[in-house]
Amino acid sequence: MNAKPRGRQFFNNPGPTNIPDRILRAMDRPVIDFMSEEFVAIHHACHNGVKRVLKTDQNLFMYSSTGHGAWEAALANLFSPGETVLMVETGYFSESWTEMANHLEIKVETIPADQRKGADIARIAERLAADKEHKIKAVLTVHNETATGMVLPLSEVRRAIDEAKHPALLLSDTISSLASMEYKMDAWGIDLTVGGSQKGLMLPTGMSLTGVSNKALEVSRKSKTPRHYWSWEMMTGRAPQKFVGTAPVHMFFGLQESLKMLEEEGLDAVFARHARLAEATRAAVRVWGSDGKGPQLFCQNEDRLSNSVTAVVMPEGVSSDPMRKAAIDRFNLSLGGGLGKMMGKMFRIGHMGDLNEPMLLGCLATTELAMKASGVPFVPGGVDAAIKSLSA
Ligand code: PLP
């Protein structure tokens, strides 16, 4: 039992995700000078490629950091201590971003939501309409809440802001939707997009980014929050690489390959693949819980189901820990767990990034195996339902 399991680990966490061999190989090369013409050209190509993925013609800043760094860069550049922002509750990640804003002494008002059904956009419109003095500087959103497997319709949020004739910026965290699900920064009127390297971009963890609208860049000039590493002004002064410090050249070698892969497949085909794999996953879960006693989809809003992650809530009184432990220790399948108050109460299947049908079916079959091995009640036949969905 203690022997190291053979074969590949099936990695179905909702981030980080599988790093394709092509990207690993692209990164497996000697270092180059980050001031060299060669690197400047790679940086330039990556910069333009990421803007194509974000669907923006505006500004982009990339950081050597996790997504938390890009969150902090967004807050520090845009707001001053004491200013107010409106956070749309989605789950663990809207709560974590709120906590960070509080630490930076930014006041956060929350639009509360039933996390299984999603926020009511009308409440955002109402709150903004009531803010006659325009104290609210921005609406902060998590496009795809990785903790709940639910999407927020950003174009509707933009419409709510416009209909209230409110000047608030619209910020969006796309960490778990970027390059997995449709995202249109400029067309949806997003002023700031937060992204990370380790999900749809299929890279190691460690690089993050912010797409910044011209309006947001203008606003950033007035922020009184002290900043240095995250400062867009500092970064702009370090053009062409725009890095405060040594640029992580290997991350860019990987990013160049990732962008090549996304563009070879075509972004629309990438989104369609994720939609197909997500629907098959949901088909399996619906069977597992079809008697009302097994695991269920956490998201109860059919219009807001995520195509990059499926959150599965356990039956009342059954912990997800033993089945996740069986999955990883006995069968070498890594699944996500519940976060925050959902710890032990759910498991999450990541189906984003470098994934195909056999990988997903392997994951779903092994999830059934782990549920059986750990005594979780479920209706068998989920894998059959997934196969039916994939072959339709
Ligand atoms: N936002 C979302 C939606 C996420 O899924 C995550 C991580 O999973 C984060 C923010 C934080 O990113 P990181 O862990 O790279 O700091």
Image (cartoon, rainbow, N blue to C red):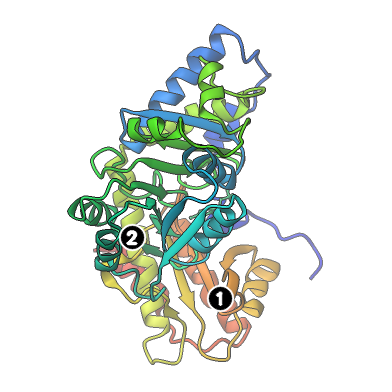
- Camera-side residue of 29 and 6: 29
Going 61% across and 11% down the picture, which residue do you hit?
35
Furthest residue toward front = 133
Disc 2 residue: CB within 8 Å of ligand 1? no
Going from N to C along the chain, the mark reached first, 1 or 2, is 2
- Camera-side residue of 259 and 366: 259
**Type of amino acid at the residue the image marks with label 1:** Met
Going 31% across and 62% down the picture, which residue do you hit?
390
**In terms of image quadrants, where is residue 296?**
bottom left
Q: In this view, does 249 lie to the left or right of 161?
A: right
Furthest residue toward top = 37
Tell me if residue 52 comes above or below residue 201 in the rendering: above
SS for dot 2: loop
**In terms of image quadrants, where is residue 153?**
bottom left
SS for dot 1: helix
Classed neighbour count for the residue bearing mark 2: other residues with Cα under 10 Å, few (<14), some (14–19), many (≥20): many
Q: Mark 2 points at which residue?
A: 152
Q: Where is residue 157 in the image (x, y as percent from the top left)?
A: 27, 56
Q: Which quadrant does the N terminus fall into?
A: bottom right
